[in-house]
Image: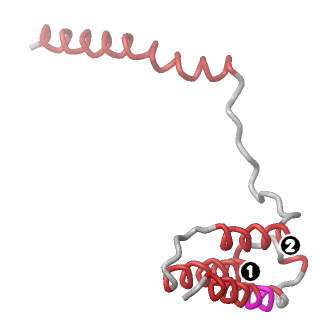
Amino acid sequence: LTEGNYTDITQQCWDYFVELMRKVTTSELCEWKVISRPYSELQGCLEYWADRLNYSYPNALAEQYIFQSHHRYFHNCTLEHPVYFDPPEDVLLAMIIAPICLIPFLVTLVIWRSKDGKAQA
């Protein structure tokens, strides 16, 4: 089978995706539970036919359709959950050093308590 066939088939995958996305309202475009099926169908279709036609996956044509889906449907979506950043350097340093400083104290405490226990015996 030729590259022309893969191009035609990927266009059919895209057309099916567009058809599925017609049922999605604008307010639902960023809800993963709503768009996961059409998105997975597109990805699955592109991967299935690449495999059937002995094409590598991902490939340039498949990636073009994935990018196109993001550009056309999902470009206004933001992350629902906040992105977490590293704490300021001084806080991070304190969080690293505090447990390290506790280790010698805890070792001393264990040794002291074990010696104290032997003395009572």
Q: Is residue 11 above or below residue 102?
A: below
Residue 22: x %, y % from top left: 85, 89
Quadrant position of residue 19: bottom right
Q: Residue at x 82, y 68 (%)?
A: 74
* Residue annotated with mark 1: 34
Q: Magenta: predominant secondary structure element?
A: helix
Q: Which region of the structure is painted magenta?
A: 15-20
* Occupied quadrant, residue 33: bottom right
Q: Position of residue 55 (x, y in %)?
A: 53, 76
Q: Is 4 a magenta residue? A: no
Residue at the disc numbered 2: 72
Whether label 2 touches label 1, CB < 8 Å: no
Question: What is the quadrant of the N terminus in the image?
Answer: bottom right
Picture coordinates of residue 89, whole percent (x, y)? 68, 20
Labels 2, 1: front one: 2
Q: Indicate the quadrant containing the C terminus: top left, top right, bottom left or bottom right.
A: top left
Kindly identify the residue that appears in the image at 79 percent across and 68 percent down. Answer: 70
